[in-house]
Amino acid sequence: MILPWIVLIFLIGSVMVWVAGLFGSLWPRIVSLVVLVAHLGMLLALWLRHVREVELTAADPWLLKYSVPWIPGLNINFSLGMDGVSLLLVVLSNFLTILAVAASWKSVQERVGFFHFNLMFIMAALAGLFLATDLFLFYVCWEVLLVPLYFLIALWGYQEKRIYAAVKFFIFTQASGLLLLLAILGLHFAHARATGVHTFDYFQLIGTPLSTETAWWLMLGFFAAFAVKLPVVPVHTWLPDAHAEAPTAGSVDLAGLVLKVGAYGLLRFIFPLFPQAAQAIAPLAMGLGVLGIVYGAVVAFGQTDLKRLVAYTSVSHMGFVLLGIFAWNPLALQGAVMVMMAHGISTGALFIIAGDLSARLHTRELSKMGGLWATAPRIGGAAMLFALASLGLPGLGNFVGELLVLLGTWQVNPVAATLATAGFILSTIYSLWMIQRVFHGANPQGWKVPDMSAREGVIMAIAVAVIVWLGLFPQTELNTARKSLEGLTAASGIVAAGPSKGAGARAEAKP
Amino acid sequence: MTASMLVPLLPLILPSAAAVMTMVAIAIRRSHTLTALLSALGLVAGLVAIPLSAAAQPRQVTPLLLLDGYALLFLGLSFSASLIVVAFCYSYFERRNEVGEELYVLLLAATVGAGTLAASTHFASLFLGLEVLSVSLYATLAYHREEERGLEAGIKYLVLAASSAAFLLFGLALLYFEAGSMDLAALAPRLGGSGSLSLVSLAGFSLSLVGVGFKLAVVPFHSWTADVYEGSPAPVTAFLATVSKGGIFAVLLRFFLPIQAPSARSMVMAIAIASMLVGNLLALRQKNLKRLLAYSSISHFGYLLIAFLAGGRDGVASATFYLVAYFATTLAAFGVIGEMSRATGREADAVEDYRGLSWSRPGLAGVLTVSMLSLAGIPLTAGFVGKFYVLQAGVRAELWPALMVLVGGSALGLSYYLRVVVALFQSGPAPSPARAGFAEVVLGLLLLALLWLGLFPEQIVALIDRMARLS
């Protein structure tokens, strides 16, 4: 019974903060913080219990399941299920939303109630999405997620192009989302024709016999939707605009969570539902992944706007996720999940820093910055640390993830793995260059700005603690995800080459 | 015709009687409140009579009318929509100096006409219903008779509707010539069922399609729609967009669905695709909310035609659900326009008029937001379930080209619906203090209905599944 409450608490919370907004602008902040922290506590308790007690197997990696009929006339159920991966992602979302609320404490002063309503509603949609085991429900959450995000960008974004950015974001994701809906319906009817059972249930739809051609088209429908959200390179153009115009909380949500939605979809659906078609497209997808890694990094280097720069680094990092998922062996998948977690935190933190800076300087132009270290050393230190995380410094979470992806990919496609290594070099260049431009060198504008406040300091300290924890003690996270990932590979019927003992073990590559 | 046939016919008789009574009441004493109340009562009586009619036998009343579940469902839908329109009209005309009483008589007559269409099984009743509907609409559309735009709307609709009726008549005559029967049920088998049509019957089919297409405003028969939407009073536009088009779509399903000849299907397919594309494209740059809704309605009827093409029980059920959702959404949107017009004292139809509405009147802004999202087909609203239902029927029938156009059209559509939503939330001019009107209560109920249909559509889905079956 705990599963529906994970979603419901956020929904109820969203109404509560809206109402709280009527009593002043402090109340929504407090209420949402309390709800979010309490909820995170509940999730952590669940996680601890999972770590200590629950023995999961690859055959049934589900911690919890829940299902009630929703629209029986259309064979739709309200079905939720939680495995290790969804647990991790819900925890990540909840954690980042807390950071987003804290980061917007001062900067959002208009319609505070509605702002926090949107944040909580995004959280509810995300929780529903990560937990849904009914494809209709998944789609509903997928689309519902867009509306509050749209409002975040369009109402609280930066002045210049925010509405253009919001509309572009919405149209890209909606059009691809409808393709997903078509593919879901196609699968639904293909299943009905093959077995006579009308269902949207994920577990029943796994292993639906499909002709090669049907599987190919349906897989493309799923892939298109997830690729836009991830984003994969040719369809990524909404991302820099949306990121650059979004308020800090919106950027944190976009980078930390919305991109994960695409990755989660790829992970959860593509291979288990369409194993053959997915394998057929894997070389192409991995090529797109490598392209994304290199392209994102190169374009990031060319940016003059701090937030756009960080946005393009996301494209690069998500290339690793795409690569890892389509390598489809436990090692690479472990890496992909780890990249998702670490990228969520490091990029989220970088966006918060960018927001803090632009609130102080009233510009996001790199050319107008420089020499800020002298006046704001603590902000500089935090930025340095997350830039190092982003470039893959050992000891921080991103390194573990990207290394695992490379190791796993090497077993399947050495060429792609070799090319992707370029990402490590390129990310070093753009990260250090960014730090150089913002914090070092001369201070031509003569900026004198206040350094990190206590509130900002606490946010950064928490984020630093988590990214270091992920880097130094990745085993807890890896263990949590392991059985689910083995379950996914088992469901797809593709026996992975290479060790499945888990990622902490040394990779013994077998050709 | 026997006395026992009167019971199934009650849902049509009572509102007709109410129309006459209202007319007499106006002759005795002009009172806006009384007139509105009487016509509302007539519609409520019609609604109450529906269960009675459903229980009665026989359903076939003379060769002309068949009061089966399908017809009764549409009657219920039309009466409910008209009831809401009456409420809007009451609020809209209350503060204006124009005399609005006759409007209610015409609305009742038009509703009866739409109901007759839904129940008709014969060319004669079809045409009768259509003309009662159209002739009543001519006058209501031009109700702003001092304004140029109102007159333009009335004249445009008059000329085009009359000529489309001529097309329809000629088409029906050709079909009669070929089939030798004016009975709709007998038509399809005599024309060769799903085989190919003869030249004469194809001509008849196309001409009647032109007639129906004009009324539905699908491409290429759509040119009147924006001007008429713009020129007529907001509640009347709401009526035109819902009850009138719904009644005609009901007869389209009953009349044309059994004709499954490839040539006929490809014609409808072309109209559907063109409507989805043209409607959405024309709406893209619209700055007038009523015109925007007019163009968007073109594309929505394009989507509906996909359900029509899918055919079978699935197609009928999905089209019916889509219409229910569309009725609720459109009524809500025009209700907001009407309420804003009442508050500003002129027809508030520019998107610019709605700038910053969320600051001054958050309730109205909320209703308009949800109805825009519902038109765009975003989940948790009625429009999404409707679109899902149509997509489902389309996928089952494997109408892939049309479905791809639907996807593209929806993405286009989103951009203009969102434009309206954004305007609502932008900072706008200083709010004019406006008293909350009676219509706001109705709008609140509509908002609940939109969300309820989006979240828990099960009851309506089951009801439609039980009732909406074409024999």
Image (cartoon, rainbow, N blue to C red):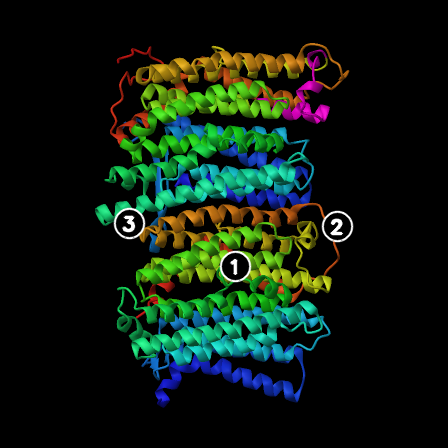
Inspect the image, locate mark 1, and give the three-letter code of the amino acid beneath it.
Ser
Q: Could you tell me residue A477's position as x and y percent?
A: 41, 21
Mark carried by residue B429: 2
Q: Is residue A338 visible?
A: no
Q: Residue at x 40, y 55 (%)?
A: B390
Mark carried by residue B236: none
Q: Quadrant of the N terminus of chain A?
A: top left
Q: Secondary structure at mark 1?
A: helix
Neighbours of disc 3 within 10 Å: few (<14), some (14-19), many (20+): some
- Same subunit under labels 2 and 1? yes
Given residues B242 and B298, the one toward you in this image is B298
Q: Nearer the viewer, mark 2 or mark 1?
A: 1
Q: Residue at x 54, y 37 (%)?
A: A169
Q: Chain of mark 3?
A: A
Inspect the image, locate mark 2, and give the three-letter code of the amino acid beneath it.
Pro
Q: Quadrant of the C terminus of chain A?
A: top left
Q: Could you tell me residue A184's position as x and y percent?
A: 35, 43
Which segment did they paint magenta? A350-374
Q: CA distance from mark 3 to mark 2?
A: 53 Å
- Same subunit under labels 3 and 1? no
Mark carried by residue B297: 1
Mark carried by residue A198: 3
Inspect the image, locate mark 3, and give the three-letter code of the amino acid beneath it.
His
Quarter of the view holding residue A478: top left
Q: Secondary structure at mark 2?
A: loop
Q: CA distance from mark 2 to mark 1?
A: 30 Å
Magenta part mainly helix, strand or loop? helix
